[in-house]
Amino acid sequence: MVHVPDRLVDILYLMRKYNIEPKTIRFVHSKPNTPPALVLIEGAKLSKPFLKIQPPLYIYNEEGNYTEEIHKIYGKDIINE
C-alpha cells in the first residue's frame, strides 16, 4: 500500500482489524532532511506478528538529482536528467 504518513496509525489499525499483519514499512522522502511524503506498507493476511522498518527511500539527492536507488528501481534509461 502507498499512502500518506499522516494516516499511518489508521492504516495499521485497520490492517490488524481485518487480519492483515503489517510486515514492512518504508518512508519515502523527496530529499534527505525532509519529512516523508509517502509511506509504503506491505502486509500479509493471517500472518504472525513481525514488522520490519526499512531504511528511508530518497527520491532526490542534495543536488536535486535522482538517487542511485531510484535509478536502480526505474532504470537509468527511463530517467532522463
Image (cartoon, rainbow, N blue to C red):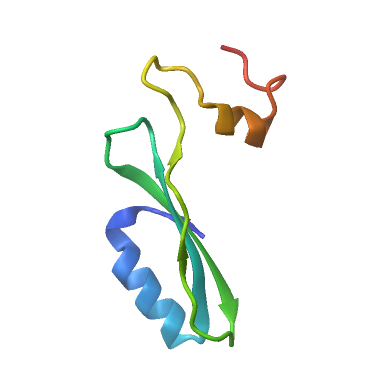
Front-most of residues 42 and 52: 52
Residue 19's spot in the image, x, y percent?
51, 87
Residue 78's spot in the image, x, y percent?
69, 22
Residue 66's spot in the image, x, y percent?
51, 23
- Quarter of the rendering containing residue 34: top left
- Residue 30 located left or right of residue 43: left
Residue at 45%, 49% in the rendered image: 55
Residue 30's spot in the image, x, y percent?
38, 33
Against 52, is 46 above or below?
Answer: below
Residue at 32%, 71% in the rendered image: 10
Front-most of residues 2 and 58: 58
- Residue 9 located left or right of residue 60: left
- Residue 10 located left or right of residue 77: left
Against 2, is 79 above or below?
Answer: above
- Quarter of the rendering containing residue 68: top right
Work out which quarter of the rendered image holds the C terminus and state it. Answer: top right
Residue at 59%, 76% in the rendered image: 44
